[in-house]
Amino acid sequence: MGLKPIRWYLKLFFSSDGKIPKNINLKKTKSPMPNTVYINNQLNQNLDIYTFTVPSGASVSNPETMYPIYTKVGTVNANDPKATYIPSADNPLENLSFAIQTTGLPVCNAVTNILGDTNIVIGTDAITNAQAAFGFYQSYKGSPYSPAALQINGIILDNTDLTQQQSLLNAWFKTNNYPFDYGLFHPYPTGPKTMDVHSQAHIIAIAHRILSPPLKLYCPNNSLAKLYLTPMDQSHTNL
């Protein structure tokens, strides 16, 4: 079929008087608004909200490039059951970390829902669970050949399907009666207070009393590092 004259196509959009018909809407369509994050904070502690992303150009071949970058995006008042946070319209899918303002301890991690609103409940036991997760991480790094550490490493290293790693670790934590899940275990040792480039860096290293080879600490400029030696030496040194 041959092309129609140009006036034939124009008739599809213009009425006989040359005006655009009222039933054609040429207004610019607005970008959809991101969904709302509703936060029920049952702790008597103020919380900071951080987003965390892997730096651009990061590579698994260079683990030092994989440390996430934390950016503070909001706060939640103590005992606030109706706090809200709205992700950026340019990035509605965000990884969120909620940390105690005074200590930087992450007590909850969540991923926003791009298909609807996100509801987050931070229970009264959140601090206890977070401290248990950090204690377990210290034990895991300080005693790498303990039965628990070997089982965790088996899940991480032997499982070829990375999409199953979180569910497998959650199942292990539940079976072994730990009060936390992957969401609280995986931020260590790089929670908001440890790697946030906008604040002092507290690099926590778990090591034995005799360090061989020597342990290297990598800190941003003008930052404070703390070296914790566990479990053989419970003392710590400010560097």
Image (tube, rainbow, N blue to C red):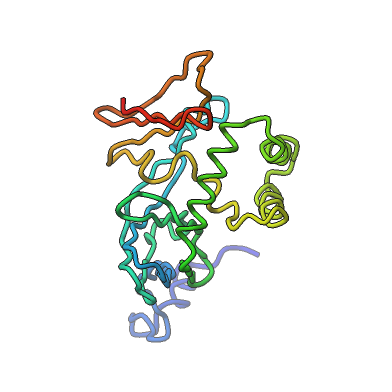
Rendered residue at 70%/53% (across/down)? 176
Choose top left, top right, bottom left or bottom right for residue 149: top right
Question: Could you say which is closer to the camera, residue 150 or residue 128?
Answer: 128
Q: Which quadrant is home to the C terminus?
A: top left
Name the residue at 74% across, 40% down: 159
**Residue 167, horizontal then vertical, whole percent:** 69, 54
In screen coordinates, is 69 left or right of 142?
left
The answer to whether 79 is drawn above or below residue 212 in the figure is below
Task: Provide residue 126's location: percent of width, then percent of height.
Answer: 48, 61
| Residue 86 coordinates in the image, percent (x, y) | 37, 66
Quarter of the rendering containing residue 39: bottom left
Residue 136 is left or right of residue 1, and the answer is left
How many marks are shown on the rendered structure? 0
Seen in the picture, residue 210 relative to 221 is either above or below; the reply is above
Residue found 33% across the figure and 81% down from its top: 19
Tell me: 125 left or right of 237: right
Using the image, determine if residue 198 lies above or below residue 108. above
User: Which quadrant does the N terminus fall into?
Assistant: bottom right
Frontmost residue, 79 versus 234: 234
Residue 10, x across and y down, in percent: 43, 73
Q: Residue furthest top?
A: 213
- The residue nearer to you, when weighing 157 against 235, is 235
